[in-house]
Image (cartoon, helix red, strand yellow):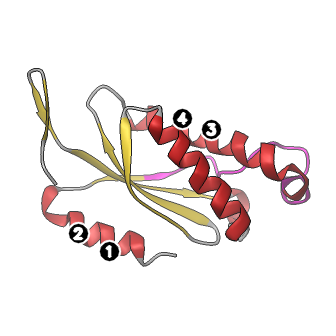
């Protein structure tokens, strides 16, 4: 990947982020995965970051995020979790009520985030692609 340049800044901020479904439930089947990916595309279009790679497994989500220095990793995580949870509940509330009762949750409280050095981008990309 190329370094980004903006005004007096030159940067390359790549993060590997993993979110786990609450209670590690294996519910990310094709219909929920489709909603999740649509929601992520919408979020990306209105944000200061790009989702370079994305893969969904039955109980977790892998993302490679290309971010600007103006937004923190915690802001990115909070934004993605809030927006995707709302989207999932809007479209799949009947199913999710059976999984999480009345608690409008979707993701577990924590997350994994790792910075990615320029030399290992292809390795991380390949790892994310093979998670589905």
The region drawn magenta spans 96-112
Mark 2 highlights which residue? 122
Which numbered circle lies on residue 79? 4
Residue 77 visible in the displayed image:
no
Q: Position of residue 64 (x, y in %)?
A: 37, 55
Gap between marks 4 and 1, in whole Å? Answer: 26 Å
**Majority secondary structure of magenta residues:** loop
**SS category of the residue bearing label 1:** helix
Depth check: 115 or 93 in front? 93
Gap between marks 2 and 4, in whole Å? Answer: 26 Å
Asked if residue 68 is positioned above or below residue 131 in the image, the reply reads above
Decide which of tag 3 and tag 1 comes sooner along the chain: 3
Q: Where is residue 109 in the image (x, y as percent from the top left)?
A: 62, 46
Depth check: 29 or 114 in front? 29
Q: Are marks 2 and 1 in contact (CB under 8 Å)?
A: yes
Horizontal arrangement in the rendering, residue 108 relative to residue 121 (left or right): right
Q: Which residue is drawn at 18% across and 43% down?
A: 12
Which numbered circle lies on residue 83? 3
**SS category of the residue bearing label 2:** helix
Decide which of tag 3 and tag 2 comes sooner along the chain: 3
Q: Do the residues labelled 2 and 4 touch (CB within 8 Å)?
A: no
Q: Where is residue 59 in the image (x, y as percent from the top left)?
A: 64, 67
Q: In which quarter of the image is the N terminus?
A: bottom left
* Residue 111 drawn in magenta: yes
**SS category of the residue bearing label 3:** helix
Query: Pointer 4: residues within 10 angstroms few (<14), some, or many (20+)?
Result: some
Q: Which residue is drawn at 71% across and 50% down?
A: 106
Mark 1 highlights which residue? 126
Gap between marks 2 and 1, in whole Å? Answer: 6 Å
Query: Pointer 3: residues within 10 angstroms few (<14), some, or many (20+)?
Result: some
């Amino acid at each position: 990947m190329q370094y980004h340049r903006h005004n007096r800044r030159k940067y390359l901020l790549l993060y590997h982020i993993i979110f786990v479904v609450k209670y590690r439930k294996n519910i990310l089947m094709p219909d929920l995965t489709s909603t999740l990916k649509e929601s992520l595309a919408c979020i990306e279009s209105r944000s200061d970051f790009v989702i370079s790679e994305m893969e969904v497994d039955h109980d977790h989500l892998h993302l490679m995020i290309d971010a600007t220095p103006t937004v923190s990793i915690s802001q990115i995580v909070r934004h993605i979790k809030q927006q995707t949870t709302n989207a999932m509940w809007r479209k799949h509330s009947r199913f999710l009520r059976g999984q999480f009762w009345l608690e409008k949750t979707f993701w577990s409280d924590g997350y994994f985030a790792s910075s990615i050095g320029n030399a290992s981008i292809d390795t991380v990309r390949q790892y994310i692609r093979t998670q589905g």
